[in-house]
Amino acid sequence: MSGFATSPVQVRVPATSANLGPGFDTFGLALTRYDEVTAQVTGGGLDVRVEGEGSGELELGERHLVVRAMRAAFERLGAHPPGLALRCRNTIPHGRGLGSSAAAVVAGILAARALATGKDSGEAFGDEAVLDLASGFEGHPDNVAACLAGGLTLAWTSDGVPRFVRLEPAHDVVPVVCVPPERLATEEARRLLPATVPHGDAAANAARAALLVTALTGRPDLLFEATEDRLHQKYRAPAMPHVLATLQRLRTAGVPAVVSGAGPTILVLSDQSGVDLVGKEVGNGWHVHRLDVDRDGARVYSVSS
């Protein structure tokens, strides 16, 4: 196994919430809920084991998303490990709009890069290349940027190349995720979006997105107005009508609530005083978790064999 790390590596990746209301396909926020992947090069074969979220449901062969991401990264590096063993400990809910697929992709790419020590992976496959490859899996860079860098990220694509900037959110912003029992495929939610939107709605979203940067980085008192969206959430109502009804109840009560990613999770961005209202409004069947902003992003560790 010349050219590969002889000990396992562990990658910890955070959950993420994208859009944050008006910042469609641009804004991302890393959250303190994590998946962990431990990967090792072996003498042959593929051994994938999953604990927690997705256990008993996910494909455990070559179609597993972490494996696919690792294979793509190894291909970029010109590395061909004889075998792989993976242990995935998942706490990020699947199909809920909390970036589980972005987390899997980022974990796989970073694990492969760390294992391919015989290649000059730091130079040949730097962070920009990681972002590019991960965004190709996801289709856009919003979740993967936040997963990689932590904190608040603003992502865009320039001449086909994904880019992002990282900002530091205010410490008194409290993320609360409200997770319903059902799942929703991102592709299904995206199909409901119209090809065009009214000019007035686009202008309103541009203003709110600009305001959201200020609100999240230093003026949490502006979060309610800053999280107003006219671009995508209302169009997704047919796929999750009770979620949008719950969202409306929260906002009517003055709570800065948005659909997390494509849904169906609702994300509340508030201070501690707003958290107490959330449980009263969402009702039974929802799992409400007060989290913090993850400020570290994806992390890679060596593991003693």
Image: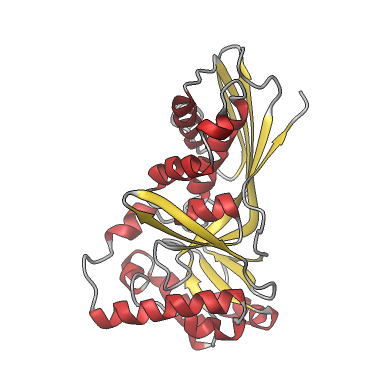
Q: Give the quadrant of the C terminus.
A: top right
Up-down: is 274 above or below 147? below
Quarter of the image holding residue 248?
bottom left
* Colouring scheme applied when the structure was drawn: secondary structure
The residue at the point 21 percent across, 69 percent down is 196
Up-down: is 80 above or below 127? above
**Percent x, y of residue 270:** 61, 78
**Percent x, y of residue 17:** 52, 61
Q: Foreground: 293 or 193?
A: 293
Q: Foreground: 31 or 131?
A: 131
Quarter of the image holding residue 243?
bottom left
Would residue 290 be found to the left or right of residue 251 on screen? right
**Percent x, y of residue 126:** 53, 38
The residue at the point 45 percent across, 72 percent down is 21
Residue 141 shows in the view: no
Q: Foreground: 117 or 180?
A: 117
The residue at the point 52 percent across, 57 percent down is 98
Up-down: is 107 above or below 254? above
Would residue 200 be found to the left or right of residue 39 on screen? left
Quarter of the image holding residue 284?
bottom right
Q: Give the quadrant of the N terminus.
A: top right
**Percent x, y of residue 201:** 30, 80
